[in-house]
Amino acid sequence: MYCARHPKVETNLRCGKCGDYICPKCSVQTPVGARCPTCARVTRLPVFQVSKKGYVKAAGLGFAAAIAFGIVWGLLVPHLFGYGYLLVLAGAYGISQLISRITNRKRSKGLQVIAGACTIISYGVAVVTGLYVSLFSLLALAFGVILAVSQFRQGP
């Protein structure tokens, strides 16, 4: 017999659901055996499926949190005796946790971009409101962006 999708390929393997002949290129291994691509219905896991509404909510909340944190951060800097740049780590973590909760703990590259951008925005607002730009603050910003983005990593 020949594969239903590749008529020139000989095979004896059948789909476990519909019974169509499938070649090794077409077969999808599932917990219940080999299936054709139609019956296997390969989809992404729900944790990696973020809707447009989810992105809008994440961006809106992240932007608002970044502005608020940037203002507070900039105003606190004079009282932290030179260690104000370390607040970027707390801000990045807090912003990424807010975004994660508003999207029901979803993960995607888009959420990584939003979290990283919001961390950079909070740094910019803090600079405008009083944070002194230095090598340490820029290094802390880089670590903050890495921290925020890593909350939405998609696996190995």
Image: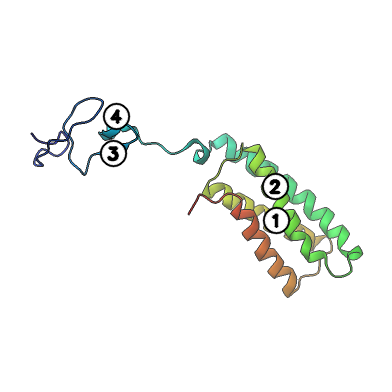
The label number, if any, that marks residue 63 in the structure image: 2
Label 4 neighbour load within 10 Å: few <14, some 14-19, many 20+:
few
Circle 4: element type? helix
Residue farthest toward the front in the current orientation of the protein:
32
Instruction: Quickly name the residue at label 1.
Output: 121
Q: Nearer the viewer, residue 68 or 85?
A: 85
In-image side of 11 versus 73 (left or right): left
Q: Earlier in the sequence, mark 2 or mark 1?
A: 2
Q: Nearer the viewer, residue 12 or 134?
A: 12
Query: Marks 3 and 2, Cα distance to the nearest angstrom?
Result: 42 Å
Query: Marks 4 and 3, Cα distance to the nearest angstrom?
Result: 9 Å
Q: In the image, what residue occupies the spot 25% across and 33% down?
A: 36
Residue farthest toward the bottom in the current orientation of the protein:
135
Q: Quadrant of the N terminus?
A: top left
Query: Marks 4 and 2, Cα distance to the nearest angstrom?
Result: 42 Å
Name the kind of residue labelled 3 in the image: Val
Tags 3 and 2 touching, CB below 8 Å = no
- In the rendered image of this protein, does residue 121 appear above or below residue 21? below
Tags 2 and 1 touching, CB below 8 Å = yes
Q: Earlier in the sequence, mark 3 or mark 2?
A: 3
Circle 1: element type? helix
The label number, if any, that marks residue 39 in the structure image: 4
Query: Marks 1 and 3, Cα distance to the nearest angstrom?
Result: 44 Å
Q: Nearer the viewer, mark 4 or mark 1?
A: 4
